[in-house]
Image (cartoon, rainbow, N blue to C red):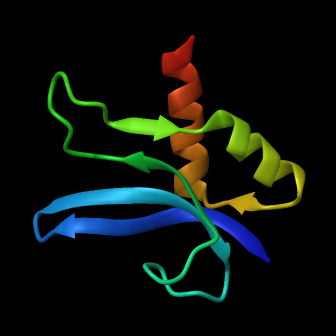
Amino acid sequence: MVVIRLSRGGSKGRPFFNIVVTDKRERRDGRFIERIGFYNPIAKGGEEGLRIAQDRLTYWKGVGAQASPTVERLINQAAATAV
C-alpha cells in the first residue's frame, strides 16, 4: 500500500519533516517515491512552516494513496490558511 506520511530530518532539538509518498513497508526515514512538501514545526515569524504541492497530493490520492492522520491534519491546516 502507498501512504503519504512524514519523514523526519533536522537535528536533535530542531525537527524538520518532509511530506513524502512511500510504500508502507519502508522505514520512516527510508526510501520514498516522491517528496511532495515539508513541515517545519518550529518556523519563526517570516519563515514558511508548511508547503504541500496540491497537484501532486491530488494525483496520489486519486491513485489510492492514503495519508497518515498527522498528514491529514496538516492538509486541512494548509487548506484553511490558503482560503
Asked whether 23 or 35 is in front, the reply is 35
Image side of residue 4 versus residue 47, left or right:
right
Q: Residue furthest right?
A: 63
x, y percent for residue 2: 75, 72
Q: At 67% from the left edge and 80% from the top edge, which residue is drawn?
A: 24
Q: Quadrant of the C terminus?
A: top right
State the image quarter where residue 52 is shown.
Answer: top right
Asked whether 51 or 70 is in front, the reply is 51
Q: Does 24 appear above or below 35?
A: below
Asked whether 71 or 16 is in front, the reply is 16
Image side of residue 31 versus residue 21, left or right:
left
Q: At 80% from the left edge and 77% from the top edge, which residue is drawn?
A: 1
User: Total label count?
Assistant: 0
Q: At 59% from the left edge and 56% from the top edge, which residue is drawn?
A: 69
Image side of residue 65 versus residue 69, left or right:
right
Q: Residue furthest left?
A: 13
Image side of residue 70 versus residue 7, left or right:
right
Q: At 88% from the left edge and 49% from the top edge, which residue is drawn?
A: 62
x, y percent for residue 20: 55, 62
x, y percent for residue 43: 21, 38
x, y percent for residue 26: 59, 87
Q: Does 45 appear above or below 57?
A: above
Q: Does 77 appear above or below 39?
A: above
Q: Residue furthest top?
A: 83
Q: Does 67 appear above or below 2?
A: above
